[in-house]
Amino acid sequence: MSHLTLALLQLLPGETQDESLRLGLAACRRAKSLGADLALFPEMWNCGYRLTGDPQANAAMAVSADGPFVRAFGMLAKELDMAIGVTFLEQWVGLPRNSLRLFDRHGQSALTYAKVHTCDFDVERLLTRGEAFPVAVLDTAAGPVKVGAMICYDREFPESARILMLRGAELILVPNACPMEINRLSQLRARAFENMLAVATANYPAGHPDCNGHSSVFDGVTWAEGFPYPRETCLLEAPDEAGVYLARLDLDLLRDFRQSEIHGNAFRRPDQYGLLTETRIEAPFVRPERRP
């Protein structure tokens, strides 16, 4: 049996970047002591998602993907023999990006992802948008896993997870910073169900503005031998409170399920989906804030 133990770091950030770094490193050590193979932070951990409408203030909070804040988690990943997904406001040409860097258990960068669907109805209109949904083979202590990422608002578009599935993802990591109520949790359940993959979401706890915890893991396996049908796909839904929350993902179960069941890419009709790439937007969905 191959089990990947996921640690969702549902934590309050520090008042300063240095404090968030210290808290984050300590949380990763805690996750390792609990048996984690991969630890994931909420969205934009280096600054606690404290974006403003002032581009200069945002730029001052941004850090390089190769700078000391991010590198510290790479070095710790190697020390702990544990993969780490760290989030940060990334320095970028023009405007910063909302990014995730995923380190493997050897401390090597396996994946860097920038949020594609920025919240342009709010202050994220002052960020540079990501332009791709990459997938990487992540080396973990539980073996290699094909991993992709979505960040918060990305999950509200089924295309995000669909592209990641088509690129081979078995696990999607979702750093988050918003209230995870029943409808958003249902979105995550659906993304896992329709793509036959696992979705792991790390959110900030209650006490952080506009957040309420409820980090979650859905494995997407709706049926398996020895389980009643339909099987519950939710492996974890954390409470409101801060903490390090663990879930064990059965990779063998997931991979066996993906070999034979009917969702994912098994019976799709891409020849009928041309309208999905139409760029024209008509009422009632016209929004003045939308960037071209």
Image (tube, grey):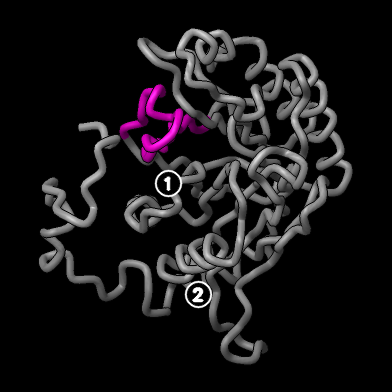
Q: Which residue is mark 2?
A: 257
**Marking on residue 278:** none
> Quick one: SS at disc 2?
helix
Horizontal side of 167 relative to 180 (left or right) equals left
Percent x, y of residue 288: 25, 37
Question: Disc 2 or 1, which lies upstream in sequence?
Answer: 1
Which residue is pictured at 49% across the width and 56% down the height? Answer: 170
Percent x, y of residue 49: 60, 29
Which residue is pictured at 88% across the width and 42% down the height? Answer: 33
Quarter where residue 113 is shown: top left
Say which amino acid is labelled 1.
Answer: Asp
**Marking on residue 154:** 1
Which residue is pictured at 82% across the width and 50% down the height? Answer: 241
Q: Is residue 137 above or below residue 223?
A: above
Q: Is residue 229 magenta?
A: no
Say which amino acid is labelled 2.
Answer: Phe
Toward the viewer: 112 or 280?
A: 280
Q: Are marks 2 and 1 in contact (CB under 8 Å)?
A: no
Mark toward the viewer: 2 or 1: 1
Q: Which residues are magenta?
A: 110-131
Percent x, y of residue 254: 55, 68
Q: Is residue 127 above or below residue 252?
A: above
Which residue is pictured at 84% across the width and 34% down the height? Answer: 29
